[in-house]
Image (spheres, helix red, strand yellow):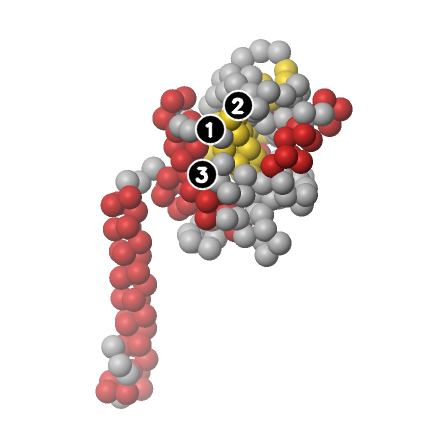
């Protein structure tokens, strides 16, 4: 896995070893939008916030601290019977999306690459790749759905795509298109038969 660099920072962290059972996806809570601003903000101890990785709008990935460190990205949180998810998870911050609410293609690709890499080396299952809003419902809403909604029907399908080979992903999308077209044809046929005018419709 290639990093832009390893950025030394006095990031807030807790004593102990992170069990690295989960990955939590976030987007940064500011529209300042520059990697320099975000890294400087993370370096301020008074802000009580930290994460393991940051992904810039151009797709560059910054490693902030070690995966084994317990960093402060989840705060009040619970998932799968566990509280304080900081102790069990690696936090990935994605720079706040563009003014139109969209993440860049480069960011999406880097998210996929980083998640796959971390899951491989730490043996994390795809079911354990969660969003901040999953583990802190009602308190957090990140990351924005545009991380996946422009290409996939659900977050789970987005995560599934990370673990597919490129060939399998292409095949899956082609099958989805064919299935959708078959449903459309079936619906048109039903309408035609109901109207008793089958030749009025082009299939």
The N terminus - image quarter: top left
Which residue matches tag 2?
Answer: 6
Q: How many numbered dots are placed on residues in this image?
A: 3
Counting from the top left corner in percent of width and height, residue 85 is at 57, 25
Between the C-alphas of marks 2 and 1, the distance is 7 Å
Of residues 17 and 46, the one drawn nearer to the viewer in this rendering: 46
- Where is residue 143, by image quadrant? top right
Counting from the top left corner in percent of width and height, residue 7 is at 57, 24
- Is mark 2 in CB contact (under 8 Å) with mark 1? yes
Mark 1 residue element: loop
Between the C-alphas of marks 1 and 3, the distance is 10 Å
Q: Is residue 41 left or right of residue 114?
A: right
Counting from the top left corner in percent of width and height, residue 50 is at 63, 26
Which residue matches tag 1?
Answer: 3
Q: Is residue 134 visible?
A: no
Q: Mark 1: give few (<14), some (14-19) or many (20+) Cα within 10 Å.
A: few
Q: Residue at x 50, y 33 (%)?
A: 61
Q: Residue at x 63, y 15 (%)?
A: 14
Which residue matches tag 3?
Answer: 110
Q: Residue at x 63, y 21 (%)?
A: 9
């Amino acid at each position: 896995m290639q990093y832009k660099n390893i950025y030394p920072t006095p990031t807030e962290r807790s004593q102990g070893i992170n069990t690295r059972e989960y990955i939590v996806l976030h987007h940064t809570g500011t529209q300042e939008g520059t990697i320099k601003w975000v890294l400087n903000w993370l370096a301020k101890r008074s802000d009580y916030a930290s994460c393991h990785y940051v992904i810039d709008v151009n797709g560059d990935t910054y490693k902030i601290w070690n995966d084994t460190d317990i960093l402060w990205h989840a705060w009040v949180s619970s998932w799968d019977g566990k509280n304080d998810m900081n102790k069990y998870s690696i936090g990935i911050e994605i720079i706040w999306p563009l003014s139109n609410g969209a993440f860049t293609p480069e960011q999406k690709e880097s998210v996929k690459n980083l998640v796959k890499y971390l899951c491989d080396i730490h043996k994390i299952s795809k079911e354990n790749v969660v969003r901040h809003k999953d583990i802190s419902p009602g308190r957090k809403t990140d990351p924005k759905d545009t991380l996946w909604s422009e290409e996939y029907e659900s977050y789970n399908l987005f995560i599934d795509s990370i673990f597919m080979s490129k060939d399998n992903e292409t095949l899956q999308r082609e099958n989805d298109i064919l299935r959708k077209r078959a449903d459309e044809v079936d619906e048109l046929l039903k309408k035609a038969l109901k109207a008793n005018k089958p030749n009025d419709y082009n299939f």
